[in-house]
Amino acid sequence: MSILRIVSYNIHKGRSAIGSRESLSQLRLGLYGLQPDLLFLQEVQGRNERQGILHAQHESLGAALDMQYCYGCNAIRPYTDHGNALLSRYDILHYENQDISDHKLEQRGLLHATIMVDETQVHCLVVHLGLFAGGRTRQIMALVDRIKRMVPDHAPMIIAGDFNDWTNRLAPLFVEQLGLYEVFAVSPQGLATRSMPLHHTVRHLGRSLRRNRLAQSVHELGINGMARMTPPPRTFPSAFPWLRLDRIYQRGFAVRKARVLHGRPWRQLSDHSPIFAELELP
């Protein structure tokens, strides 16, 4: 059994939400205190030719946290570029960045890495979806297609990032197509008062969803096999969170805990609040 500490965070290119000041130095300290095993990061600058302290952010964070890293460059500007990054305490076996841009105004990518946790391969995907609903749907279908082609049916998987899905329309698709669950829907927190039986959850997730796909092992749900119609947390803007943009979806784990990191120092470091989760791999 392995316990993985997971953080998903849109770091706003290493700049604070207010005043656009450099925040990468404080970000290193904040993340170091969390002792993460996996970091799913969005809006990471791989290149900054004007401000050296903001250059190669995945490398500087990886060095400070003693973690391996991979980076997917998506948006290229004259003096900068940015994209998604995965940092891992476990060996990164291989990775690939897939362009899922829907139009020229938004460059989006899907970073897919495979790590080795003890003797188990875990697939990790970092996403940052577009601002328009139609584009997000097409990007999710590209994600589903990639997973069906490249990830074994029962392989443990984590998908995390900034989904820009404030209406939460994508969750049923993840459950129906991939058997993935958002961590707050299956976390033990608040289960006594907010949980519902599994068959009730199935009815709410869609008539086309077969009950036996949900009623699999406990390690695809919560610690005690329950799921809830809990909406994802509010993470944006970090000073006064209102929109539900950031998610962590998982398959093959038991969710031990999940929470949003509010208050200091997080509200000063980025315009998004980070999400933290503990996942148990049997």
Image (cartoon, grey):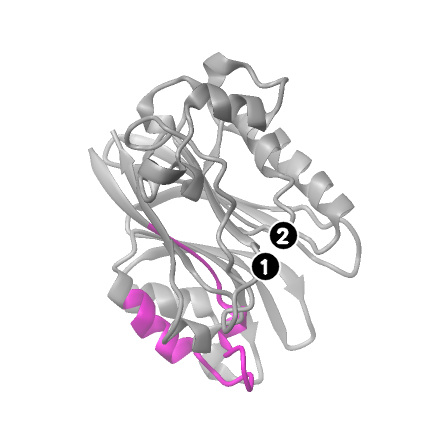
> Marks 1 and 2: in contact by CB < 8 Å?
yes
The residue that disc 1 covers is 243
The residue that disc 2 covers is 166
x, y percent for residue 84: 53, 57
Local SS, label 1: loop
Whether 281 is among the magenta residues is no
Image: magenta residue range: 6-32
Residue in front for this viewpoint, 173 or 11 = 173
Local SS, label 2: loop
Q: Is residue 89 left or right of residue 46?
A: left
Q: Which quarter of the picture shows residue 267?
A: bottom left
Which residue is rendered at x = 41% and y = 24% of the image?
197
x, y percent for residue 273: 46, 64
Whether 20 is among the magenta residues is yes
Quadrant where the C terminus sits is: top left
x, y percent for residue 238: 50, 69
- Ranked by sequence position, the earlier of labels 2 and 1 is 2
Which residue is rendered at x = 28% and y = 32% of the image?
223
Which residue is rendered at x = 34% and y = 72% of the image?
28
**How far separated are the C-alphas under marks 2 and 1?**
6 Å
Which residue is rendered at x = 55% and y = 64% of the image?
236
Please name the amino acid that badge 2 sits on. Answer: Trp
The residue lying furthest to the front in this view is 193
Camera sees residue 254: yes
